[in-house]
Amino acid sequence: MRNQNSRKNNTSALDELYEAILCLETKEECEAFFADLCTVLELQTISQRLQVAKMLRDHRVYHDIVGTTGASTATISRVNRSLGNGYEIVFERLQKKKPRKNANSGEEPEQL
């Protein structure tokens, strides 16, 4: 019975975390919240995984990803196995937020 209560509390705590994140409205608010919530190492790890996911999505090889991000092949494999709906939702929404090609500069927007 204790294990069931623990799982229920974990689910509730995760739900509260997700709701808290959804309350944030600006990048500055996100920076403040995550600085309070996570250690520097945890934030670096999370951001590294996002970079790995972007590179995997661009069909980059593990060797390039290791060299660019410093991620281990185990981390790259883990991200590769979980590359799915969550990452795609974020990548699609980030792409929509990117400005279109600047007619004056001739520069292409960065691909996610």
Image (spheres, rainbow, N blue to C red):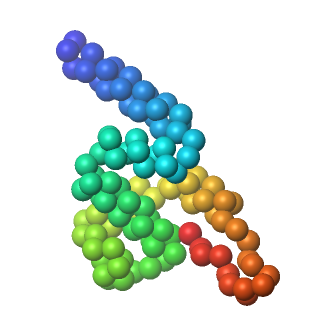
Which one is in front, 69 or 104? 104
Visible residue check, residue 46:
yes
Visible residue check, residue 11:
no
Residue lying at the far bottom in this picture: please name it.
106
Which one is in front, 22 or 25? 25
Left or right: residue 98 compared with residue 4: right
Residue lying at the far top in this picture: please name it.
1
> Residue at image x 63%, y 55%?
93
Horizontal and vertical percent position of residue 53: 44, 65
Horizontal and vertical percent position of residue 94: 60, 59
Q: How many numbered marks are there? A: 0
Horizontal and vertical percent position of residue 59: 48, 77
Left or right: residue 64 compared with residue 94: left
Q: In this view, does 47 lie above or below 105?
A: above
Instruction: Tell me the quadrant of the picture where the C terminus can be found.
Output: bottom right
> Residue at image x 43%, y 49%?
31
> Residue at image x 65%, y 76%?
109
Quarter holding residue 71:
bottom left
Which one is in front, 58 or 35? 35
Left or right: residue 40 compared with residue 32: left
Q: In this view, does 29 lie above or below 23?
A: below
Residue lying at the far left in this picture: please name it.
2
Quarter holding residue 63:
bottom left
Instruction: Tell me the quadrant of the picture where the N terminus can be found.
Output: top left
Horizontal and vertical percent position of residue 69: 33, 74
Quarter holding residue 79:
bottom left
> Residue at image x 66%, y 60%?
97
